[in-house]
């Protein structure tokens, strides 16, 4: 399974942090300002993205090997995020 790209993580951080303050330049790197609410939002975005990546891996394995257990695992992973 491929790890989440730096660009995708930064995009999620920018999206969450812009509610309190835009990303700010700090030398050659970016800094982000998070209040509790936006930090929780960022953590949820990362969790949802990672959960979906895991479920997609199960889907691919199920398709490749015709394994219905893999499809059950993908469904269970996605259900963890259901309200």
Image (cartoon, rainbow, N blue to C red):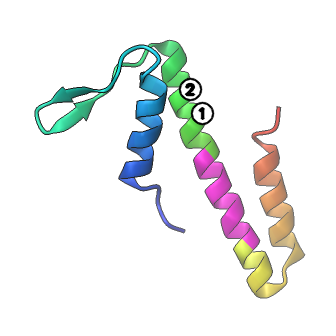
Q: What stretch is highlighted in magenta?
A: 49-59
Residue 32, image x and y in percent?
A: 32, 25
Which residue is the site of mark 1? 44
58 horizontally vs 23: left or right: right
Count of picture labels: 2
Residue 52 vs 82, above or below: the answer is: below
Question: Mark 2, residues whose alpha carbon is within 10 Å: few (<14), some, or many (≥20)?
Answer: some
Instruction: Please report the residue visible at 55 percent of the width from the left and 23 percent of the height from the top.
Output: 40
Mark 2 lies on a secondary structure that is helix
Q: Hey, which residue is sitting farthest bottom in the picture?
A: 65
- The residue under label 2 is 41
| Left or right of 74 on screen, residue 3 | left
User: How far apart are the alpha carbons under marks 2 and 1?
Assistant: 5 Å
Where is residue 1 drawn, in percent x and y?
Answer: 54, 68
Element at label 1: helix
Task: Determine the image quadrant of residue 82.
Answer: top right
Q: Which residue is drawn at 80% across and 70% down?
A: 70
Please give the name of the residue rendered at 31% of the width and 26% of the height, measured from the top-left corner: 23
Q: Are marks 2 and 1 in contact (CB under 8 Å)?
A: yes
Q: In this view, does 45 lie above or below 74?
A: above
Quadrant where the C terminus sits is: top right
Q: In this view, does 64 lie to the left or right of 69?
A: left
Q: Would residue 22 appear left or right of 8 to someone viewing this image? A: left
């Amino acid at each position: 399974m491929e790890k989440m790209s730096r660009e995708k993580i930064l995009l999620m951080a920018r999206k969450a942090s812009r509610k309190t303050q835009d990303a700010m330049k700090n030398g050659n790197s970016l800094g982000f300002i998070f209040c509790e609410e936006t930090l929780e939002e960022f953590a949820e975005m990362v969790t949802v993205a990672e959960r979906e990546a895991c479920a997609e891996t199960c889907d691919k394995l199920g398709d490749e090997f015709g394994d219905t257990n893999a499809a059950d695992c993908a469904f269970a992973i996605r259900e963890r995020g259901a309200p």
